[in-house]
Image (tube, rainbow, N blue to C red):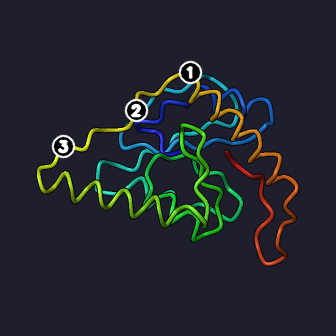
Amino acid sequence: MDADACPVKQEVYRVARRYDLGVTLVVGSWMSTPNVPNVSVEVVGQGFDAADDWIVAHAVRNDIVITGDIPLAARGLAKGVYALGPAGRPFTESNIGDALATRNMLSEMRGAGQVVGGPPPFDPRDRSRFLQALDRAIHGLRKTPARPDEPDRPRDA
């Protein structure tokens, strides 16, 4: 999980406990976590994209990467991970191009001094959508057969 600004950490802990999954929080500085099994914290420092680089380097096919960072989601998809936004939007091969293009266009508009607003406030419906999407992802990935050329390891959330 790209955890520094992730608003759904508590939901991930609950789901991971229910399915007995491991969770790795990747952060720029130390973060306290609940005393629950299978939750670890990886502090990577404050460097530009340090957390993203760590996640991409350590993620394997069928891991679930939770992030609102569209470029990180794209990098993860290239490795075969399941990328899920905190509002419950899965990033897929079919929608990542549009998401990147929109992100880049808005960034250029902000750079040109145009006011484009920000994302809508995170609300309880977003949490509900996230929980439903995470549950679907876990069930779907558990049905996906492992490839023989990949290490057999528990799938993490």
Task: Judge by depth and name the residue closer to the eye, 123 or 59.
Answer: 123
Tell me if 23 is positioned left or right of 72 in this view: right
Q: Earlier in the sequence, mark 3 or mark 1?
A: 3
Residue at image location 65% in from the left, 51% down from the top? 64
Q: Position of residue 121 (x, y in %)?
A: 41, 27
**Which is more foreground, mark 2 or mark 1?**
2
Tag 2 residue: 120
Say which residue label 3 marks.
Answer: 115
Could you tell me if the residues under marks 2 and 1 are in contact, i.e. CB atoms within 8 Å?
Answer: no
Q: Residue at the location (59% across, 28% down)?
A: 127
Say which quadrant the C terminus sits in.
top right
Q: Secondary structure at mark 1?
A: helix
Give the quarter of the image for residue 152. Answer: bottom right
- The amino acid sitting under disc 2 is Pro
Residue type pointed to by label 1: Pro
Are the residues flagged by discs 3 and 1 in contact, CB closer than 8 Å?
A: no
CA distance for labels 2 and 1 = 12 Å
Q: Is residue 92 above or below residue 129?
A: below
Residue sitting at x 38%, y 58%: 102
Q: Residue 54, how many percent across, how many down? A: 47, 58
Mark 1, Cα crowd under 10 Å, few <14 / some 14-19 / many 20+, is: few
Determine the secondary structure under disc 3.
loop
Name the secondary structure under disc 2.
loop
On the image, the x and y values in percent for residue 88 come to: 60, 40
Q: Quadrant of residue 141?
A: bottom right
Residue under pointer 1:
124
Q: Give the quadrant of the N terminus.
A: top right
